[in-house]
């Protein structure tokens, strides 16, 4: 059974595909969504929906289905409101106030007053005619002239002006008397002079009292914790506002709430119920450091446990990084106030609600109990200190708490590790990567990769960077981590999570150097955290760094460099076989094959001159080579498969969810996206594999920028199948992965379910290829070098995946920076316009081998175990 939604579907398609349909208002489409898929549509807490909404992909459109967007500060209006902006609707609200309201307050009095709280009581009582109203009982059309609502300010928005110049200020008021109620907050719209006064006085956490207000019902029902009505307040309507404060509450360091501190009740994780707002304590079992969503919000994911042995995963969103929990490691203890609980697929999940606040404590037994806070004001009772201590003791014996972060001196190749370090330099590399230069006072035991950047682009103290040239390492961060990396201050202390120490060549056990990468996405907790100087690990690191004498290493280096003969500088580095001595080219040509040689020669010329033509696809099984297919070939295959209708019986299985829509162009094209699940839950876009039917090349490229992997498929009677192997079977970021037609035996796509069932699916191309019966083709550089020395000339072939240029062959076709780097490298090895005597010397290994055909035996030569020197580019 399918449900058709007119007006909503095209916007959902637009939300997913980002201009797949260029204008969903002018070019509407009808969406068919299987009822099994409805939890994805209706669940506002679902991770992908949250992510896409947080990315502002829906900006500028009015949604008529309310359940998706309620928690995200977007307004919902009836069809009569059309496409009005929030600002325009606020103007409508401002101009539609009841002007006949009787003014019971003295016009000469201030409409906004501060009430000083002493020993829990206000020094100035409220007017005697005012009666307190219950938030739950508010109704539109009733007279609230002599009534007041009291609550705590949990959220406020910037002061703005409406179209007619009227000041407008908006807050979220939390009902402090009913914190556990499902509906316990309401929006208050303040107009005119009162808006200006409130914007200056109000701080989060203060007690706010409003009298003489007007209740306006929202056009759609609420599904979150907020009330189904708004309050409108203005001086012209006779409203009055009282803000309760205490002496000395102007400092941000105060640790008590400005109102009388309520007695909070904390709910164990095994007592959580769907639809409630609760307070809780928990121990961090897993977390993802805050990262910037593709919209404006920061996001963090935290998994908590407690002695009830129940697990709770919380998705936390906020536009302010400082408002998210300050978690530094597994084992930290958190206190969440006003966290919203939702049930999905039989499991409870937590999500931020209005007024959400947190405290974080070091989970180490015996450490000082000092809260890291996301609020300017908070309460922390004596009995809560006992709660923290008990959780520390329980966690020490019941969960695996990570030990101290690794030191650079202990790093090994092919590891993922956390590093506590100091930032000493940074530079932009390209649009999707950013360089961080860091040190921790210890020396990496392996030569490390130096990322090539222009000196003028590198931020940091140049003298200090020179002093640290043998201690600092380069970490290249990608994708969603770039924006945060750009904002980091030189000298700050960082904890970088899940750094990958990568070998220069996976085929060589004697590694010439290692590279450090922080890959895109947030799998395994990848991210960057800024540590305050009060952090115990920072104090220890800072003391160690200050104790180092950097001049000792420099003096030793100077002495060693005196023995180096600069006339033998080479632009290449040998990574093995150091026992071999140099052999003249003439001798090599007169010797039989196969043999290995070490040579010192100059590069006279190379082919192809157009370097992009050097990239080929290689099958290691049948040893065949082929050209990389043109994008037009891929587009042709996609358009051909679009004529095959998607089979509805293959939608929404146990391991993927499906959505289908039809475009309203001449061809009435049908597009289906299958979202692969993990543990019966959809994942963040950067962790999600999609299978796409009927998409064009443009649409698939757009999806590949948002989601981890894309597999183009087509429907058959029994299963989804891959397209013709002339097309890529997988797209990941900007790389297209192909299979060998001769050696592959494609299997049904349902075999992917075994990977989806793994504890932490990595979606590595080699693993995907294996379960799908594909022999993966490898991108490789194929070039012919003409080498010369004093005795003769010799043609040697370069057959290299990424070792020689230190550039992955699979990425260069879509990366302008890498293309420029390769061109600069070749211009250095073989400078154009130079005479032979002015060319640089290269030192490399070559091996000879025989190729026999029906007519004769021929000897060829291949470069191996050689890398371009780090300082060439």
Image (cartoon, rainbow, N blue to C red):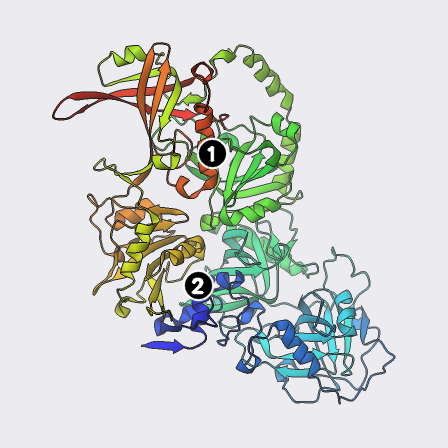
Mark 1 or mark 2: whose residue is earlier in sequence: 2
Label 2 element class: helix
What numbered label is drawn on residue 16?
2
Instruction: Please rate how many residues cluster around mark 2, counting C-alpha atoms within 10 Å: few if below 14, some from 14 to 19, many from 20.
Output: many
Q: Is residue 555 left or right of residue 377?
A: left
Vertical arrangement, residue 548 with respect to residue 518, above or below: above
> Residue 139 sits in which quadrant?
bottom right
Q: Quadrant of the N terminus?
A: bottom left
Vertical arrangement, residue 277 with respect to residue 608, above or below: below
Residue 684, position as x, y percentages in the image: 45, 57
Q: CA distance from mark 1 to mark 2?
A: 35 Å
Closer to us: mark 1 or mark 2? 1
Q: Is residue 244 left or right of residue 609?
A: right
User: What residue is disc 1 on?
Assistant: 821
Residues tagged 1 and 2 counted as in contact (Cβ below 8 A): no
Identify the residue at image location x=23%, y=37%: 624
Q: Is residue 34 left or right of residue 169?
A: left
Identify the residue at image location x=40%, y=62%: 681
Vertical arrangement, residue 739 with respect to residue 157, above or below: above
Identify the residue at image location x=31%, y=42%: 628
């Amino acid at each position: 059974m399918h449900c058709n939604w007119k007006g909503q579907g095209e916007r959902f398609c637009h939300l997913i595909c980002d201009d797949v349909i260029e204008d969903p208002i002018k070019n509407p489409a009808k969406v068919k969504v299987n009822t099994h898929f409805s939890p994805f549509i209706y669940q506002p807490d679902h991770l992908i929906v949250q992510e896409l909404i947080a990315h502002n992909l829906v900006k500028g459109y009015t949604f008529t289905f309310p359940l998706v967007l309620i928690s995200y500060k977007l307004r919902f209006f009836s069809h009569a409101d059309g496409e009005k902006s929030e600002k325009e609707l606020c103007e409508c609200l401002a101009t539609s106030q009841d002007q006949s309201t009787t003014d019971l307050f003295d016009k000469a009095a201030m409409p906004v007053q501060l009430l000083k709280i002493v020993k829990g009581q206000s020094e100035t009582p409220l007017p005697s005619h005012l009666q307190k109203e219950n938030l739950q009982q508010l109704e539109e059309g009733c007279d609230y002239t002599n009534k007041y609502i009291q609550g705590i300010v949990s959220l406020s928005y910037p002061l703005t002006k409406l179209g007619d110049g009227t000041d407008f200020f908006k807050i979220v008021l939390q009902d402090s008397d009913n914190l556990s109620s499902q509906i316990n907050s309401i929006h208050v719209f303040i107009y005119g002079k009162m808006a200006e006064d409130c914007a200056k006085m109000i701080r989060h956490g203060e007690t706010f009292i409003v009298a003489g207000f007007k209740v306006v019902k929202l056009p759609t029902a609420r599904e979150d914790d907020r009330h189904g009505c708004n309050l409108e307040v203005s001086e012209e309507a006779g409203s009055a506002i009282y803000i309760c404060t205490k002496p000395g509450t102007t400092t941000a360091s105060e640790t008590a709430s400005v109102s009388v501190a309520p007695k909070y009740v904390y709910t164990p994780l095994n007592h959580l119920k769907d639809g409630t707002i609760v307070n809780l304590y928990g121990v961090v079992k897993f977390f993802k450091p805050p990262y910037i969503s593709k919209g404006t919000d920061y996001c963090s994911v935290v998994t908590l446990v407690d002695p009830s042995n129940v697990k709770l995963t919380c998705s936390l969103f906020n536009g302010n990084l400082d408002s998210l929990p300050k978690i530094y490691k597994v084992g930290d203890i958190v206190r969440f106030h006003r966290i919203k609980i939702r049930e999905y697929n039989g499991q409870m999940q937590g999500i931020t609600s209005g007024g959400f606040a947190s405290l974080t404590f070091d989970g180490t037994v015996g450490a000082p109990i000092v809260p890291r806070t996301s609020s300017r004001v908070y309460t922390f009772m004596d009995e809560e200190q006992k709660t923290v201590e008990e959780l520390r003791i329980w966690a020490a014996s019941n969960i695996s708490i990570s030990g101290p972060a690794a030191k650079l001196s202990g790093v090994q190749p092919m590891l993922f590790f956390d590093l506590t370090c100091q930032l000493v330099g940074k530079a932009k590399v390209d649009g999707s990567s950013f360089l961080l230069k860091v040190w921790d006072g210890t020396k990496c035991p392996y030569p490390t990769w130096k990322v090539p950047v222009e000196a003028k682009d590198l931020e940091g103290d140049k003298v200090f960077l020179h002093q640290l040239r043998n201690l600092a390492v380069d970490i290249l961060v990608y994708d969603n981590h770039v924006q945060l990396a750009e904002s980091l201050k030189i000298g700050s202390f960082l904890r970088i999570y899940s750094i990958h120490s990568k070998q220069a060549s996976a085929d060589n056990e004697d590694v010439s150097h290692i590279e450090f990468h922080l890959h895109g996405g947030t799998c395994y907790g990848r991210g960057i955290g800024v540590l305050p100087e009060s952090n115990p690990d920072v104090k220890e690191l800072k003391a160690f760094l200050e104790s180092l004498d950097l001049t000792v290493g420099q003096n030793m280096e100077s002495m060693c460099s005196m023995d180096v003969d600069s006339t033998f500088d080479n632009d290449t580095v040998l990574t093995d076989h150091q026992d071999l001595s140099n052999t003249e080219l003439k001798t090599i040509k007169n010797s039989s094959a196969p043999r290995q040689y070490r040579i010192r020669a100059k590069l006279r010329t190379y082919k192809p001159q157009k370097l992009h033509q050097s990239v080929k696809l290689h099958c290691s099984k049948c040893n065949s080579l082929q050209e990389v297919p043109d994008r037009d070939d891929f587009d042709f295959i996609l358009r051909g498969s679009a004529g095959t209708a998607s089979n509805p019986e293959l939608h929404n299985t146990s391991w993927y969810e499906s959505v289908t829509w039809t475009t309203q162009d001449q061809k009435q094209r049908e597009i289906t996206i299958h979202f692969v699940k993990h543990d019966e839950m959809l994942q963040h876009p950067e962790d999600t594999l999609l299978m796409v039917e009927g998409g064009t090349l443009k649409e698939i490229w757009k999806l590949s920028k948002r989601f981890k992997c894309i597999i183009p498929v087509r429907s058959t009677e029994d299963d989804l199948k891959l397209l013709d192997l002339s097309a890529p079977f997988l797209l990941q970021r900007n790389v297209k992965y192909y299979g060998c037609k001769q050696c592959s035996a494609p299997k049904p796509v349902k075999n992917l379910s075994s990977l989806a069932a793994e504890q932490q699916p990595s979606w590595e191309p080699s693993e995907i290829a294996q379960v799908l019966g594909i022999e993966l083709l490898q991108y490789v550089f194929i070039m012919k070098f003409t080498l010369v020395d004093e005795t003769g000339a010799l043609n040697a072939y370069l057959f290299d995946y990424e070792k020689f240029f230190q550039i992955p062959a699979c990425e260069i076709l879509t990366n302008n920076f890498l293309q420029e780097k390769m061109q600069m490298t070749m211009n250095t090895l073989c400078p154009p316009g130079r005479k032979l005597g002015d060319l640089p010397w290269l030192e490399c290994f070559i091996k000879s081998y025989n190729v026999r055909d029906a007519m004769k035996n021929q000897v060829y030569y291949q470069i191996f175990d050689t890398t371009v020197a780090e300082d060439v580019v």
